Image: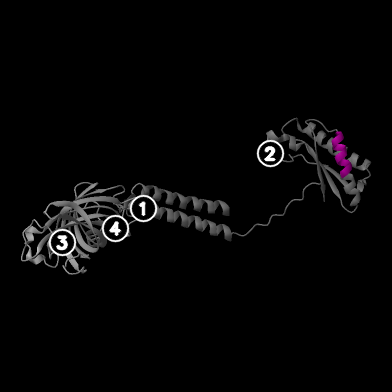
Amino acid sequence: MKKITLLACACAIAACQSAFAQEATQEITYVEDPSQGLLLNRFKDNWFITAQGGVATYFSHHDVHRNLSDRFTPAAGLYVGKWFSPVFGGRIGADFIGLKGLAEAGNPGINPNEPMVDGYYKTYQNAVGPALDLMINLTNWWCGYKPGRIYNATVYAGGGGYWTLTKQYGPDGEGQGWHNTHDRILAFRAGIINSFNVSKQVQLSLDLRATAMDGIKDTREMWENRTYLAVQAYLGVTYLFKEREWHAPVVPVCPPAENCDALRARLAAADARIADLEAQLRDCLNRPVEKVEAKKAPLATIYYPINVYRLTRDDNNVLEAVAEVMKSNPNNHYTLTGWADNYTGNDAINIRLRNNRVNGVQKKLVKCGVPESQITATINNGNLCDLGEKYVALDRAVTIEED
């Protein structure tokens, strides 16, 4: 009873939980939640390539004497980069800057065919070399990451090195091509990139940069290292390789139930059912245990076919073993009871069968040496098992019981 009641309780609880779970899962959706942070992408993701071209203006030692409009030169760059997160990234590439200025006689890059300005010669040099920048996306940092944002502001700082090339002129003033001046320049630069997303793959940008350049040769009497400034403005195009976006952890969204009255009613009914089952369990556990005296099983039972009372060889073997038990317990008394089923035959036939059966067993036991004083033979007019007509074979027997 205890096991059945506990099983009923478990079934009731499981049924309630299953019903609620089924209704809940039909409503749950899963979305990315940026408030939980962003997941770092694989190393092969979030790469880009940028090509840019623009103008540069050089501010060297004597450039204040040369008109600003006459100092603009072409500039270009090609970079490959990667964003390690929506905020931090880096790029590496090659940079080109044209440098126009003024210098004294004997300096590289002097153009003798150009008129002098306040006693200084006009110069023109090209600087080419590698560059490396570390980048911070201010828009994503301050405003949060948003994949569909059109405008992003990115600041960067880095450095590089340049080889300078100047145009050589012969005594007659004819140009003799570009030559390496063997003047290696270290450069440190910083700037801001204003980028505009025109598609998921392509960005257009305006890159405003200031570059501090060290190592320009700019005196007549000696090679003197100084630091000068170049200001550049570039228009660029960037192609973004897959994966281009950043993903947030996926969280479940469970909309509130519009009306929970039905669920509350079902829960209350389940609680009431559980309380009732618990009360039944307590009553069952507190119920006094009835003591039932177990009826002693017969020492042996001899079964007969219908309308038969004679013993078979197997029956004789059994009775011989029973006789040995009786003789080894001489102080015990045994009762032999003859039985016949009441579903077949009539009373006269059945009484005769009962008597013949019990008398045959008694004679066999006495023949095997059991004293007659140790045995009482009787009959019973009822059915031995009384399980119905289908099991009448169990009612045709002689039982041997110890008193």
Nearer-N-terminus badge (2/4)? 4
Q: Is residue 101 above or below residue 351?
A: below
Nearer-N-terminus badge (3/2)? 3
Q: Residues within 10 Å of mark 2 (few under 14, many from 20)?
A: few
Which of the numbered marks, if any, corresponds to residue 387? 2
Which amino acid lies under the numbered mark 4 shown in the image of this protein?
Answer: Gly
Residue topped by disc 4: 89
Question: Mark 2 and 4 residues: CB-CB less than 8 Å, in contact?
Answer: no
Q: Residues within 10 Å of mark 4 (few under 14, many from 20)?
A: some
Which amino acid lies under the numbered mark 3 shown in the image of this protein?
Answer: Val
Q: Nearer the viewer, mark 3 or mark 2?
A: 3
Question: Mark 2 and 1 residues: CB-CB less than 8 Å, in contact?
Answer: no
Image coordinates of residue 249 in percent, x first then y, are 34, 55
The kind of secondary structure element at disc 4 is strand
The kind of secondary structure element at disc 3 is strand
Which amino acid lies under the numbered mark 2 shown in the image of this protein?
Answer: Leu
